[in-house]
Amino acid sequence: MKHLTRYLLLICGLLTTNLNAEPSQLIKAFSASAEFTDIQISPTGEYLGGITIDKTEDKRALIILDMKTMKPSYVANFDGKGEVGAYYWVNDERVVLQKTYKQERIETSAYYGEMLAVNADGSKPKYIFGYKGDGRASGGTSIKKSAPIQATSYMLDTLQDEEDDILVMAYPWTGTNHAITQIYRVDVYSGKRKKLASSPVQNAGFLVDHNQNVRFSYSQDEKLNDLLYYFDESQDQWVPGDKFRGDLHEFRPIAFTADDKSIYAIGAKENETRAIYQIDIATGKQQKIIQHPIVDPNELWIDQKTKELYAVEFENGHPEYEFLDKQSTKAKVLKQLMAAIPDHRIRIVSETQDGEKLVIIAMNDKNPGDYYLFDSKKLKLKYLFAQKSWLDPALMAEVKPISFTARDGKELHGYLTLPNGKELKNLPLVVNPHGGPHGPRDNWVFNSENQLLAQHGIAVLQVNFRGSGGYGPKFEEEGYQQWGAKIQYDIIDATQYAIDQGWANKDKICISGASFGGYSALMAPMIAPDMYKCAVGTAGVYDLEELHDSGDIPKSYSGGAFLEQVLGNNVESLRAMSPTHNVDKLKAAVLLLHGEEDIRAPMEQFDAMEAALNKANYPYEKKIWDKSGHGFYTPESREIYYETMLSFIKKNLAL
C-alpha cells in the first residue's frame, strides 16, 4: 500500500474556497479538478471504489474504501508516469483497471490497452492484458507477466455470474486505421485468455446476450455507411443484419430483452427523431416503443445486473424520463430518488449484484454532482461525496432553457445562464457556441466556465444551432456545408433574441467558444460586425481548406468522407466560410488561445488566422500553451485560460 496516510488526509483536508474571495481564488475554485469521480460499489456491497487525484504527483488513483468503516483498504497508484484510467468490479473482491500514462509533451494521458487486476485489499496484483508484462503494482510490488498482445483493449462484459472471467474487446495494432475487432475471454487471476470471436468488419462494436454469446456486431465503413451483422449459430458465421435494421437510419443495437428473443435498438425513420425499437430476432419485426417528438434519447439506462434496458432519458430543456415498464423495480426506485432529491438529474451509476444498494449521482445546473448510497430495501439515502464540495450550489447561477424562432421560421432551443442575484434585464452577455458542430449539443448542466462568468455579473447564452446533435438526424444534416451560413445565422438570431427580450445589453456582448465554437467566435462577428464587441477563439478552426489537410480528422478511418459530407470540397465555398478570408469584415476585439499540441485543430489553424490578421494589420491578442492539446486538462492550464479570457472580456465590455 502506497502512502495510505496521505490519502486519508486527502479525504479529510480537501480544498475549500469562499466565493466572495479575491478574483484569483474564485478562478482557482472553478479551475480545480473534481475530488472524486466514478464512484462504484462492489458486487456484495463490502467495498466502495472511486477515482481521486494524488495531489503530490497530480495523477489519477483508485481508492477503495471499506464500507463498514469508510476508511481506505487499498489505494491503486502506479509508479512513474502510470495512472489509473477506468476500473471495473469483477467479483466480490477483484477489480480490473486500465493503466494510462501521463505524457511529457501534452497534458492528457494516453491509453495503450493495458489492463491489470488486483484484490480490494491490494493482494494478488496481476497484469492481465496488454502489450507488455512488466508493469508494477502500487508500492513497487511486481506484477507477473501475462502473454503480451499488441492491441488496445476495452471491457465488453464483466460477466457478473462468473467469478474469474471477463470479456475483453481488443483492437489490434495494425499500423493503419483498419482493425478487425477481437473478443477474448480473460481470467482476471491468471491473465490467461481465449479468443472467442472476430468482428466481420473493421473497428466494430459488439452486443452480447444474457448467455454470454456474442450476437451482434456493428460499425461504419470508410464512407460512413452503417454496417450491422448478426451471428447465425445455425451457419456458424456472421450474416448481414439488414432484416433487423429495415428502413431505420442511424441504427445501433442496445440490449437484449430478458428472454434473448428480441433486442432493443436505437434508430430513426426519415425526417424523425431517433427512437427506441424492439425487434424480434426470428422475424425482424420492429415495434417502436419510445420516442420524443423534438429530441433524441439523451441517455439509455441499462440494468447492470440483468443487462436490460429499463429507462430512457430525454432533454427538451430539462431532463425527463420514459420507462419501459412503469411498474418495474428500477422505475419505482428512480421515482423515489427523484422525489427525494428534487430538481436534479438522477443517475444510477453502480449497484450491488442483488440490486439492494445503489450508488447514484445527483446533479443539475448549479451542482456538478453529489454521490449518494441508496438502500432500496430500507429506503434509506446516505450522502457520500461531492465532486466539488467547495462550490456552494446556493451561490451558483441558474441555467434557464429557452426557445426562439430563427429568421426562416425554424424553432431552436438553447440555454441562458443567469447571474445570481441580478435582474434579468440589460445584462452583459457572452455567447458561447458549442464545439462539434455535428453530434454535440448543449445541455442543462453545470458549466464551470459559464458559472465563472456569471459570478462576474455576465449572462451566458448557448444555442443548439442547426447541425447540433440531439434533435434528430435531419436537424443535424441541415447544418452540413452551412458552417459559415445557417449555423452562424442561428447563433446571431439567438443573440438578437436575447437583445429583443431585454435580457442583454446590446452594447455589451462578446462571443467566446472552443473548437468549432472558436470558429464561430470569429465567423459570427464577420457576418454581424456590429453585434459583438469582442471575440475569443479557443482551439479554433479558422481555415476550412486547411482542415482537409492537417490534423487528425483527415487521417482517421472515415475522416475524409466526414469532411466531404459536412464541408464539401468547393474551394470558393470553403474560403467564403473561413475566418482567414474574411478579416476585412471584422470590428470586434480578438483574442486567440491555442495549444501547441492540438491535433484536432493543429497550430496550422492558429498560424493561418494570425497571418490573416497580420496581413490586414488588424489588432489582436493571443496566448499559446506549450503542453495543451484540444482543450485545457490541468487545473493550472484552466486557471491561466480563465484568467486570460475573463480579463479580456471584462476589459472589452468595460466591466
Image (tube, grey):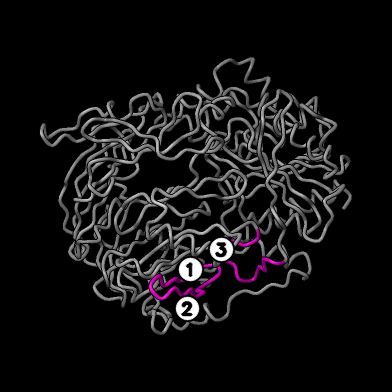
Q: Is disc 1 placed on a helix, strand or loop? A: strand
Gap between marks 3 and 1 measured at Cα: 15 Å
In the image, 612: left or right of 291?
A: right
Q: Is residue 381 magenta?
A: yes
Query: Three-letter amino acid code at disc 3?
Result: Gly
For residue 52, the mark is 1
In primary-sequence order, the first of circles 1 and 2 is 2
The residue that disc 2 covers is 7
Please tell me whether residue 501 is drawn above or below residue 248 in the rendered image: below
In primary-sequence order, the first of circles 2 and 3 is 2
Gap between marks 1 and 2 measured at Cα: 9 Å
Magenta part of the protein: which range? 366-394
Look at 55% across and 57% down and name the residue there. Answer: 345
Please tell me whether residue 529 is drawn above or below residue 276 in the rendered image: above
In the image, 245: left or right of 620?
A: left
In the image, 80: left or right of 27?
A: left
Q: Is disc 3 placed on a helix, strand or loop? A: loop
**Residue 606 x, y percent position in the rendering:** 65, 36
The residue that disc 3 covers is 369
Which of the 4 image quadrants contains residue 572?
top right
Query: Three-letter amino acid code at disc 1?
Result: Thr
Q: Is disc 2 placed on a helix, strand or loop? A: helix
Please tell me whether residue 464 is drawn above or below residue 20 in the rendered image: above
Q: Nearer the viewer, mark 2 or mark 3?
A: 3
